[in-house]
Image: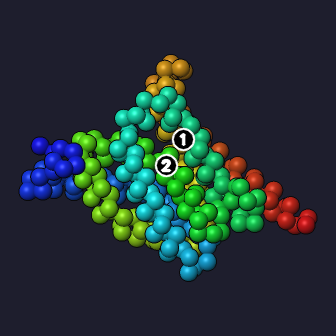
Amino acid sequence: MLGALGETDFAQGAFWLALAEITGLNLLLSGDNAVVIAMASRLLPPAQRRLTILLGSLAATLLRILFCAIITILLDVPYLRMLGGIGLVWIGIQLLLPASGPSDTKAKPDIWGAVMTIAVADTVMSLDNAVAIGAVAKGNVTLIVLGLAISVPMIVAGSQVILGALLRFPGLVYAGAGLLGWIAGEMIGSDAALARWTGIAPATLEEALRTPLAVLVIATGIALKRRARRREALQ
């Protein structure tokens, strides 16, 4: 049996199988996190990008460990997923704005600002990941920590690959922002409290919200970006 911390039997094949499952699951579910990490660090000087990616990936992993430990409590909070989805919409729009835009709504060109953006986004997106990882781990903290720690270098590598693509093809940033809007639609639609209030099944809500929110993020980001550039031209 896989128990809690202190009861883990490392000689059991079930432990190593579960560890492999958690590591693979985290990598599979971390693609959206890698996109956010790359987008948030793209405006930094080259010398600072690697440190930001490393710190952002570590922050993402620590947050996921925390959420895996308290996920039962979090899932009982009504409308939490809906609020998280709204937060993702805001972050997606923010990451489209130029560095010269308003300080509160830009992809911040400093290490700690970028890491904070990554941490906030991952706080929202880690809910679904934590549910899946927690289900495999069955409360075993050792499995959760080891599985997530093993996957950190791979997340860092993935973020660097995506960052390289964003720097070479800047237009891809719109696809990344749209992805956040798409994920936001899934999060809002999967909120059980919202489904009860509207009387609409979560799957139907997700399908209805994903594309419109992806379009909303991209369109709003483009509009605000153009307005910011017009203001700069008048100054």
Q: Residue at x 39, y 48 (%)?
A: 66
Q: Position of residue 132 (x, y in %)?
A: 32, 43
Can you give x and y, in whole percent of width and height, for residue 113 in the image? 61, 63
Q: If the image is split into quadrants, where does the N terminus sit? A: top left
- Corner quadrant of residue 158: bottom left
Q: Earlier in the sequence, mark 2 or mark 1?
A: 1
What residue appears at the point 85 percent right and 65 percent down from the top-left corner? Answer: 232
Q: CA distance from mark 2 to mark 1?
A: 8 Å
- Percent from the top left, x then y, of residue 120? 54, 52
Going 63% across and 58% down the picture, which residue do you hit? Answer: 95
Give the residue type at disc 1: Gly
Q: Is residue 204 above or below residue 8?
A: above
Quadrant assignment, res 39: bottom right
Residue 84 has which mark? Answer: 1
The label shown at residue 109 is none
Labelled pair 2, 1 in contact (Cβ < 8 Å):
yes
In the depicted view, which residue is nearer to us: 172 or 34? 34
Kindly indicate the quadrant of the structure image that contains residue 147.
bottom left
The residue positioned farthest toward the front in the image shown: 6
Q: In this figure, which residue is indicated by the disc labeled 2?
A: 123
- Tell me the quadrant of the picture where the C terminus can be found: bottom right
Q: Is residue 163 visible?
A: no
Count of all numbered marks drawn on residues in the image: 2
Front-lying residue, 153 or 27: 153
Graded by Cα atoms within 10 Å as few (under 14), some (14 to 19) or many (20 or more), the crowding at tag 1 reads many
Task: Categorize mark 2 by other alpha carbons within 10 Å: few (<14), some (14-19), many (20+).
Answer: some
